[in-house]
Image (cartoon, helix red, strand yellow):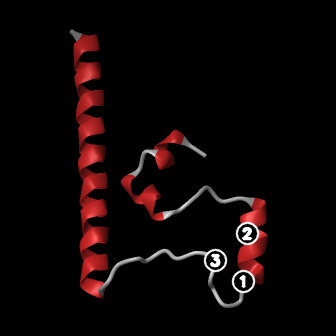
């Protein structure tokens, strides 16, 4: 799995890395009892968590872009 995804704030939504055995067990899990993705008490809480995660991702992208720009700027001087 790429380090980009492991360090992503949205990657925490997944409990573990996907695997072949996990895929087979999810196909056989007809009652959907093995994995839960939304542990929020209300829809508003889930929306708030999703928005927070999205804005963290935007902030991380901006921060990385600024760092890359500064590195390029110092190379050209």
Label 2 belongs to which residue?
Answer: 23
Nearest the viewer among 50 and 42 is 42
Q: Residue at x 65, y 59 (%)?
A: 18
Q: Secondary structure at mark 2?
A: helix
Q: Give the mark nearest the N terminus, 2 or 1.
A: 2
* Dots 3, 2 in contact, CB < 8 A: no
Disc nearer the start of the sequence (3/1) = 1
Left or right, residue 64 beside residue 19: left
**Residue denoted by label 3:** 34
Q: Residues within 10 Å of mark 3 (few under 14, many from 20)?
A: few
Quarter of the picture containing the C terminus is top left
Helix, strand, or loop for circle 3? loop
Q: Are marks 2 and 1 in contact (CB under 8 Å)?
A: no
Is residue 29 rendered to the left or right of residue 34? right
The residue that label 1 is drawn on is: 29
User: Residue at position x 23%, y 49% from top?
Assistant: 59
| Distance (Cα) linking label 3 and label 1 | 7 Å
Contact (CB < 8 A) between labels 3 and 1?
yes
Residue 59, label in figure: none
């Amino acid at each position: 799995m790429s380090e980009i995804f492991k360090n992503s704030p949205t990657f925490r939504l997944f409990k573990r890395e996907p695997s072949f055995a996990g895929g087979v067990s999810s196909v056989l899990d007809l009652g959907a009892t093995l994995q839960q993705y939304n542990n929020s008490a209300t829809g508003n809480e889930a929306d708030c968590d999703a928005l927070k995660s999205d804005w963290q991702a935007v902030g991380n992208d901006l921060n990385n872009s600024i760092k890359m720009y500064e590195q390029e700027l110092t190379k050209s001087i």
